[in-house]
Image: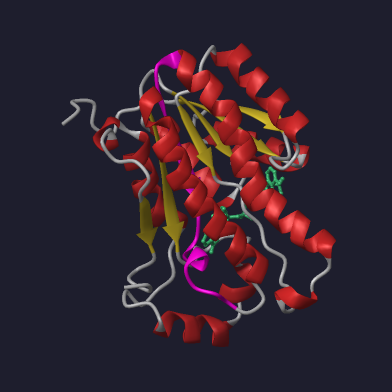
Amino acid sequence: MSEMGLDLSGKVALVTGGSRGLGMAIATAMAGKGADVAICGRKQENLDQAVKAFGQKGIKVMARVANVGKSSEIADLFQAVEQQFGKLDILVNNVGMNILTPSVSEVDEGLWDKIIESNLKGTYLASSRAVGLMKKAGGGKIINISSIAARKAAMGMGIYCVAKAGVEMLTKVLAVELSQYNINVNAVAPGMVKTKFSQPFWSNEGMLKELTKTIPMGRIAETDDVVGAVLFLASGLSDFVTGEIITVDGGAMA
Ligand SMILES: NC(=O)c1ccc[n+]([C@@H]2O[C@H](COP(=O)([O-])OP(=O)(O)OC[C@H]3O[C@@H](n4cnc5c(N)ncnc54)[C@H](OP(=O)(O)O)[C@@H]3O)[C@@H](O)[C@H]2O)c1
């Protein structure tokens, strides 16, 4: 077993969508373990607020505007990371979004493209860029944030379910392809986590009560419930783990 444990000192981590929610919790935890951290998001004002919030915890992050679905913005982001830190050891493909949709058979093409682009294409684009830097560094860790929606169809979330299923297969494909470069690719699949993304569900008392009945542990996750699995996959403790998806859902899928 690696002697480094969960220590990430000397490592450089990029967390996409790190300006709030789960991404912010992951970035905070990685910085707490000694990593230099970069984050991105679409909106400068969200990044500014995040930088302030990180600063109040004594954490300095590099923050750049980049929409993960746009290859030119991803190229600029990775160039900035390389310029600032000279390398990349850890990529967390955390960005994900959903827009409540009618049946997949009825949605227009634009909506399909938008949801697939943010959740799946973005993961592919960022991973591709990361691989170049990780090869130079002699290895690395890619961690994709999936969802239990990848394995359980849900009304109103059809395209998101398809996209996350794609993220899970992309995880396995890249794991197989990149092992030769000492790059581990794994995913974490949370159930519902209390963030802005899921607020329409957990802020509705009736919905929350019904949902909670399906979770053996009797509650939805806080962001910190998910962070441990990500830290494990980012650290030397998981050096022989690749192509794996860790479900963090309080037993909902068990
Ligand atoms: N919350 C849940 O219940 C839950 C459950 C299972 C899985 N997940 C997954 O967990 C991950 C994090 O979700 P969350 O709940 O923390 O979401 P969130 O609170 O909505 O945060 C999303 C973050 O991503 C950024 N972002 C969104 N689209 C982007 C894009 N195209 N390019 C760059 N940045 C983008 C947002 O900033 P800007 O708005 O400024 O871009 C924000 O920083 C997602 O992959 C989600 O699918 C969440």
Location of residue 10 in the rendering, given as x and y in whole percent from the top left corner: 39, 18
Residue 17 makes an appearance in the image? no
Which residue occupies 79% across, 62% down?
Answer: 111
Please name whichever residue, 139 or 95, is drawn nearer the observer in this view of the structure.
139
Magenta span includes 140: yes
Q: Quadrant of residue 158?
A: bottom right
Left or right of 10? Residue 54 is right
Task: Please report the bounds of the magenta region as a residue range.
Answer: 137-154
Report the quarter where the N terminus lies.
top left
Location of residue 153 in the rendering, given as x and y in whole percent from the top left corner: 55, 75
- Coloring scheme used: secondary structure
Report the quarter where the C terminus lies.
bottom left
Which residue occupies 45% across, 66% down?
Answer: 191
Q: Residue furthest left?
A: 1
Please name whichever residue, 86 or 158, is drawn nearer the observer in this view of the structure.
158
Give the total of numbered labels: 0
Image vertical order of residue 111 relative to residue 119, above or below: below
Location of residue 4 in the rendering, given as x and y in whole percent from the top left corner: 23, 26
Location of residue 33 in the rendering, given as x and y in whole percent from the top left corner: 36, 31
Please name whichever residue, 184 or 45, is drawn nearer the observer in this view of the structure.
184
Image vertical order of residue 126 relative to residue 197, above or below: above
Left or right of 249? Residue 203 is right
Magenta span includes 226: no
Residue 168 makes an appearance in the image? yes
Which residue occupies 39% across, 66% down?
Answer: 249
Q: Quadrant of residue 252?
A: bottom left
